[in-house]
Image: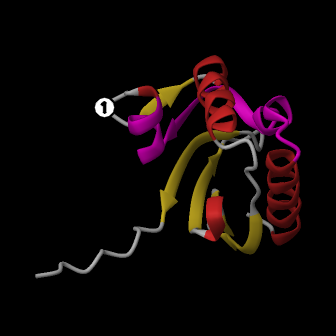
C-alpha cells in the first residue's frame, strides 16, 4: 500500500464524513463489502455487528448521522499495511477511533472494521 494512495484515501474519507455525504463515503467501497462495528450491534440490533453491501451499510450510516447530526472526525494518523490502511481519528465527542480498510485489486474497500475507545470505567462508590 503506497503512502500517497493511503493519505489521499484518508483525507477524502474524513472530508466525506465531515460533509455528511454518505454516497461519497460509499464511493470508496466495493458493492458487496463487509463492515463490522460494535455500533452496528447497538444502532441496528444486528448481533453479529456485521453488515454486507452498500445498501445495508449506507442505511446504517444514514441512521447514525440522524442520531449524531453534529458528527465530525479529526484525522490523527494514517497507517499502511500490505493490502490495508488504518485511519486513526478523533470521532464523536473527541473519542479516539480507528478503522481498518482492506482493499481489493481495484483499490476499492472489500472489508472495513471499526474500533472505538472504551469509555473510562466509572469509580464505584461506597
Q: Residue at x 75, y 60 (%)?
A: 73
At 47% from the left edge and 68% from the top edge, which residue is drawn? 117
Q: Position of residue 8 (x, y in %)?
A: 89, 60
Asked if one can make out residue 53 in the rendered structure from this viewpoint, the answer is: yes
- Local crowd size for mark 1, using a 10 Å CA cut-off: few (<14), some (14–19), many (≥20): few
The quadrant the C terminus occupies is: bottom left
Q: Is residue 29 magenta?
A: yes
**Residue sitting nearer the eye, 121 or 6:** 121
Name the spot of residue 83 as percent of width and height, x first: 63, 56
- The image quadrant that residue 10 belongs to is bottom right
In the image as oriented, which residue stretches furthest toward the top? Answer: 55
Of residues 59 and 2, the one nearer the viewer is: 59
Residue at the (67%, 70%) spot, across then down: 80
Residue 96 in picture, x, y percent from top left: 58, 70
In the depicted structure, whether residue 5 falls above or below residue 29 = below
Percent across and percent down for residue 78 are: 72, 71
Q: Is residue 23 left or right of residue 115?
A: right
Residue at 84 percent across and 51 percent down: it is: 18
- Tell me the quarter of the picture where residue 30 sits: top right
Q: Is residue 37 visible?
A: no
Left or right, 40 with reference to 71: left
Q: Which residues are magenta?
A: 19-43
In this view, which residue lies farthest toward the left?
A: 126
Count of numbered circles in the view: 1
**87, above or below 61, in the image:** below
Circle 1 residue: 47
Q: Quadrant of residue 104?
A: top right
Front-lying residue, 112 or 90: 90
Element type at mark 1: loop
Q: Determine if the magenta segment contains residue 88.
A: no
Q: Quadrant of the N terminus?
A: bottom right
Amino acid at each position: 500500500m503506497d503512502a500517497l494512495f493511503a493519505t489521499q484515501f484518508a483525507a477524502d474519507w474524513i472530508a466525506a464524513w465531515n460533509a455528511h455525504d454518505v454516497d461519497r463515503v460509499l464511493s470508496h467501497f466495493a458493492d458487496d463489502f463487509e463492515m463490522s462495528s460494535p455500533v452496528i450491534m447497538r444502532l441496528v440490533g444486528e448481533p453479529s455487528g456485521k453488515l454486507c453491501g452498500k445498501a445495508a451499510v449506507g442505511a446504517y450510516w444514514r441512521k447514525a448521522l440522524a442520531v449524531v447530526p453534529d458528527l465530525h472526525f479529526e484525522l490523527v494518523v494514517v497507517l499502511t499495511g500490505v493490502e490495508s490502511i488504518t485511519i486513526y481519528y478523533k470521532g464523536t465527542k473527541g473519542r479516539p477511533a480507528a478503522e481498518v480498510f482492506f482493499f481489493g485489486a481495484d483499490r476499492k474497500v472489500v472489508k472495513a472494521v471499526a474500533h472505538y475507545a472504551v469509555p473510562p470505567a466509572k469509580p464505584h462508590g461506597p
